[in-house]
Amino acid sequence: MLRVRNEGARRGFGWAFLIGLGATIMEVIYCAIAFAGFTHLFDSRLIKATMELVSFLLMLFLGLKYLLARSLPATTRSIETVEHRLHPHTAFWTGFVRCLGNPGVLLWWITISATFISHEWMDDTWPSKGACVLGVALGCFAWFTLLSFLASRGHGRFSTHTLLRMSQFSGASVLGVAIVTGVRLIGLLAHH
């Protein structure tokens, strides 16, 4: 997100848009891998219950991590390693490689797929999974397009403080989902 903001302010909408497009494509690939490769594991009641607990704990951790963040790192070690090895030279490949270098994105989508399937918020069918992946693609595309447009028009007016507030809002949202998941778990435990 910082890269899109900085590049949009410095090089304009087109460059930032291509970075966002590359990140969107990789995000959708990670999402599709998570939904295609891991949802069949949730057939067992024990694994399903375990994944509900793990998804609750992970969402709680991520929500608190982003909500309580005091600064935004410019990059992570895994992203730097992948960028150093692949040397992306275009805007699209920069966005793609930056998302590829963040294994937390795949872990996030595995957790989301586990949560959706275990809570029966989504059917374990290909049309349902495909609709979810399509929704992710459209949502990411819209988000990065909007962010690219605003950054290019704002010429760097997104301060680090504003981005930190956006991250904290995301953390509060994830924490809200964790609370709903926790309440559901408590209800299931009380019922059994």
Image: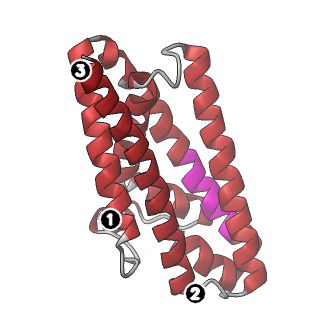
| Amino acid beneath label 3 | Ile
Which secondary structure, mark 2?
loop
Pointer 1 residue: 65
Whether residue 85 is visible: no
Q: Is 33 contained in the magenta span?
A: no
Q: From what the image shows, is residue 87 above or below residue 36? A: below
| Residue 44 percent across, percent down from the top left | 26, 12
Pointer 2 residue: 159
Labels 2 and 1 touching (C-beta < 8 A): no
Give the spatial CA distance, label 3 vs label 1.
26 Å
Q: Residues within 10 Å of mark 3 (few under 14, many from 20)?
A: some
Instruction: State the residue at coordinates (43%, 41%).
Output: 180
Instruction: State the residue at coordinates (61%, 63%).
Output: 19
Q: Residues within 10 Å of mark 1 (few under 14, many from 20)?
A: some
| Residue 74 percent across, percent down from the top left | 41, 78
Chain-order first, disc 3 or disc 1: 3
Which secondary structure, mark 3?
helix
Q: From what the image shows, is residue 6 above or below residue 34? A: below
Give the spatial CA distance, label 2 vs label 3.
43 Å
Chain-order first, disc 2 or disc 1: 1
Left or right: residue 74 compared with residue 190: right
State the image quarter where residue 130 is shown: top right
Q: Quadrant of the N terminus?
A: bottom right
Q: From what the image shows, is residue 182 above or below residue 105? A: above
| Amino acid beneath label 2 | Ser
Span shown in magenta? 16-26
| Amino acid beneath label 1 | Lys
Pointer 3 residue: 47
- Residue nearest the observer in this picture, 19 or 153: 153
